Image (tube, grey):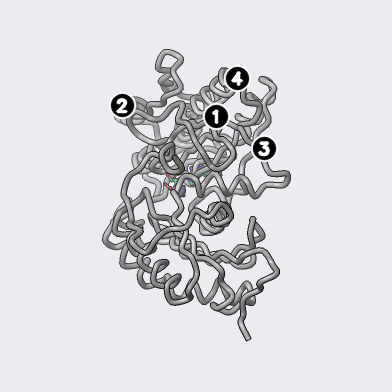
């Protein structure tokens, strides 16, 4: 007898391996999480102060098989119950993405089920669509991660129009680099947040790049300002919480202000914030206050669904599968590709 559940909504296995998290999830369309397993490589890369691409690829290779077994065991389903395999096809570290794509294609072929190619940023947005109640399209999506900081107009069908982006560092990158200067380990975002809890956000006047009201972002000047502050003011370690809180505040202030202004200008009543930096408590707090004052609602996924995970890949995959957007076996991994072109 087949293990498939023909009358039920399809079971989608999601695979994420685009950077330093390996993750596998089994989701019943459109978004019921049946099982999720994740192996963070943070410890592995920590001693290098950042992600080493070749090391990341090898770790993905080692951990994918056990994670598939673990996710299915948690879901209480056999491999044969899987109706489709969704995978992050990019953007990301090309070797890392390639491991996931090759694995997903092989698995889908062996099971005789479709493979669905997901753009990493549409997966991040799909995490927010799992909220109860789900945010209605159209909305403004603020995507803030280690590699991206962008504003999009999001329409039904996971179609995105880019309204602004960083012209240099991503917000997560600014936090990671700032953390390193403060002697904190990688990944720096959560470490800065932790240290900042004991500090005053107005202690150091770090600069904000407003870019003349544009919806673009710039964080490289802020990073330089931190370097200069540490070299010139030479704060002693007791003052580091103040420095961390002020640095975090400069990032959060710009993200929140630009997102709200952009939503109002676009006539959008909801802001959806996704990506690793969306896990930041101060960003969630400040954005909720400012958006509320401007008459906008905010949706942010639970912190565990903000950072890279496979639930979001399976959830995006389920939506694409529903629209018949499956991939052929010649599907290739890609290092870069604008989200706005993913579903044209
Ligand atoms: O989305 P993500 O997990 O991976 C990428 O696609 O890049 O985002 C990772 C980024 C890192 O820069 C990390 O420092 C940051 O998200 N991050 C945070 C927090 N948790 C992760 N930044 C600030 N506060 C956090 N709690
Ligand atoms: Zn990500």
Q: Earlier in the sequence, mark 2 or mark 1?
A: 1
* Disc 3: residue Cβ within 8 A of ligand 2's nearest atom: no
| Label 2 crowd (10 A; few <14 / some 14-19 / many >=20) | few
Return the x and y of residue 252 as percentages of the image width and height. Answer: 51, 30
Query: For mark 3, what is the residue?
Result: 136
Depth check: 219 or 89 in front?
A: 89
**Disc 2 from disc 4: Cα separation:** 36 Å
Query: For mark 4, what is the residue?
Result: 264
Quadrant containing the N terminus is bottom right
Q: Earlier in the sequence, mark 3 or mark 4?
A: 3
Q: Which mark is residue 228?
A: 2
> In the displayed structure, does residue 72 sit left or right of residue 8?
left
Query: For mark 1, what is the residue?
Result: 200
**Vertical side of 100 occupied by 181: above or below:** above
- The secondary structure type at the circle numbered 1 is loop
Q: Earlier in the sequence, mark 4 or mark 1?
A: 1
Return the x and y of residue 217 as percentages of the image width and height. Answer: 41, 26
Task: State which mark lies toward you, 3 or 2.
Answer: 3
**Disc 4 from disc 1: Cα separation:** 30 Å
Can the viewer see residue 242? Answer: no
- The secondary structure type at the circle numbered 2 is helix
Residue beneath the point at 56% across and 69% down: 83
Task: State which mark lies toward you, 4 or 1.
Answer: 4
């Amino acid at each position: 007898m087949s293990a498939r559940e023909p009358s039920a909504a399809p079971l989608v296995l999601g695979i994420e391996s685009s950077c330093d998290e390996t993750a596998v999830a089994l989701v019943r369309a459109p978004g019921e999480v049946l099982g999720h397993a994740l192996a963070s490589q943070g410890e592995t890369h920590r001693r290098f102060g950042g992600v080493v691409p070749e090391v990341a690829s090898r770790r993905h290779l080692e951990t994918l098989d056990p994670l598939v077994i673990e996710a299915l065991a948690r879901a209480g389903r056999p491999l044969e119950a899987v109706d489709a395999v969704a995978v992050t096809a990019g953007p990301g570290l090309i070797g890392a993405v390639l491991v996931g794509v090759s694995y997903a294609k092989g698995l889908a072929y062996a099971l005789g089920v479709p493979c669905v190619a997901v753009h990493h940023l549409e997966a991040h947005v799909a995490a927010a669509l799992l909220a109860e109640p789900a945010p209605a399209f159209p909305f403004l999506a603020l995507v803030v991660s280690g590699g991206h900081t962008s504003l999009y107009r999001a329409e039904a069908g996971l179609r995105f129009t880019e309204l602004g982006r960083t012209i240099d560092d991503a917000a997560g990158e600014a936090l990671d680099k700032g953390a390193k200067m403060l002697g904190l380990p990688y990944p720096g975002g959560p470490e800065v947040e932790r240290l900042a809890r004991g500090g005053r956000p107005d202690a150091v006047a770090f600069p904000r790049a407003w870019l003349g009201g544009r919806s673009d972002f710039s964080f490289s000047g802020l990073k330089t300002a931190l370097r200069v502050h540490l070299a010139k003011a030479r704060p002693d370690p007791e003052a580091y919480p103040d420095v961390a809180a002020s640095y975090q505040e400069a990032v959060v202030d710009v993200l929140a202000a630009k997102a709200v202004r952009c939503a109002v200008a676009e006539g959008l009543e909801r802001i959806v914030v996704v990506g690793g930096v969306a896990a930041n408590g101060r960003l969630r707090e400040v954005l909720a206050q400012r958006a509320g004052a401007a008459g906008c609602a905010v949706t942010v996924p639970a912190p565990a669904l903000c950072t890279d995970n496979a639930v979001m890949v399976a959830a995006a995959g389920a939506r694409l599968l529903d629209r018949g957007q499956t991939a052929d076996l010649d599907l290739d991994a890609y290092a870069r590709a604008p989200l706005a072109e993913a579903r044209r």
